[in-house]
Image (cartoon, rainbow, N blue to C red):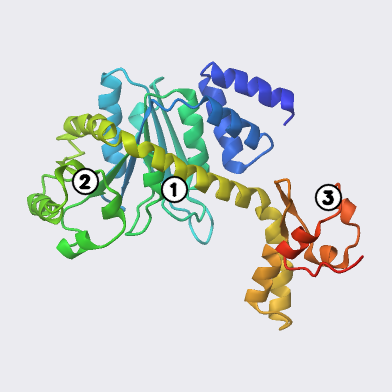
Amino acid sequence: MGRMIIRELLERFDRRDWKVLGKAISIVENQEEGCWEILNHAWKTAQEECLVVGITGAGGAGKSTLIDKLIRICRDRDRTVGVLAVDPSSPYTGGAMLGDRVRMNAHSSDPGVYIRSFASRGSFGGISQGAKYALYLYKAFGFDVIFLESLGVGQAETDISCFVDVTTVILAPGNGDAIQLAKAGTQEIADIFVINKGDKPEAEMLRLQLMAEFAVVPEEYRPLIVKTTAKDGTGVEELTDCFSQVSRRLLPARRIKQQIRIENEIFTGAACFYEPQLRRYAKELTQEVLAGTATPFEAAIRLGNKILIKDQGGIYMQMREAIQSRKSIRGYLPEPVSKEVLEQVGVEASGE
């Protein structure tokens, strides 16, 4: 894809062309040509005033059904809505059902709603890398409200809290006792606890357990607790109001979240950019380990030494063996490698 085509795509994107939004998401999700140019543009034009709500919780808690009802209320209030939903990938086939879109199908013809599903593709933390990139596109596109739904998580997938303004943890009555509430993980990142399926007899007991759990927390830092029944919409209007209320309260923490998110993007961006080269060399090193000529830990160090940080900045992929033998170094860099850089990758800085 040439630069002219990418430039035309970005011009149409700025005009809020829905078809181009889908194309741009596909490019960044699959890291096709033009990916970084699109992401740079999205970062510079992102509208931070939009409200980003994270929805997480165990599988079967009713996340998608609840989002379906939240979309309806937001549209009644004349607010445009973008939804990013992550579904787990099969560890064997790599495929994903993307069933969230089925539950939200009633909004497929609404011009004020855009729903995109993503396969997790083995990512950790409950959110795929493609969904994280797409979030920047959503912000630049100018949605009023963005719902980011993580895949069904356990007690440690907490990445979502760094990418959203309000983190909502969905709980279902009858799925564990008070001991589960004391465990570290998703319970600690919640700004709002939603007890879904609130018509069950266990729902009130769960609400009392939550209240007792957070009784020692100062009121201004205490997460809100809301009971809903997604299938008939009970309590969803109240929950929608809570998003704006909590977002205003957490405004001072936005800067901290942004710093964590930027650090994460720099790291994962570099990892994504160089992953193909690193994986190719990792396959070669695997054969050496299998042959008994190296250990996995020695191989890991050699793989890490392929990343050479130049004095002026920027990351260059280098063959450690080529640096050590000082052969054809100008084929890699426009100038000789300094003694300091050689020492940085653990190579003896002896003569030519």
Q: Is residue 277 left or right of residue 161?
A: right
Q: CA distance from mark 3 to mark 1?
A: 37 Å
Quarter of the C terminus within the rendering: bottom right
According to the picture, the residue beneath numbered tag 1 turns out to be 127
Task: Please state which of residues 224 and 66 is positioned toward the viewer in this rendering.
Answer: 224
Which quadrant holds the N terminus?
top right
Find residue 276 and report its horizontal and vertical position in percent: 69, 54
Question: Which class describes the residues within 10 Å of circle 2: few (<14), some (14-19), or many (20+)?
Answer: many
Identify whether 38 is placed above or below 218: above
Specify the quadrant of the image occupied by residue 324: bottom right
Q: Secondary structure at mark 2?
A: strand
Q: For the residues marked 2 and 3, what is the alpha-carbon distance in whole angstroms?
A: 54 Å
Q: Earlier in the sequence, mark 3 or mark 1?
A: 1
**Residue farthest along the bottom direction in this orientation:** 292
Q: CA distance from mark 2 to mark 1?
A: 19 Å
**Residue at which label 3 appears:** 333
Judge left or right: residue 240 versus residue 286: left
Q: Amino acid at mark 3?
A: Leu
State the residue position of label 2. Answer: 193
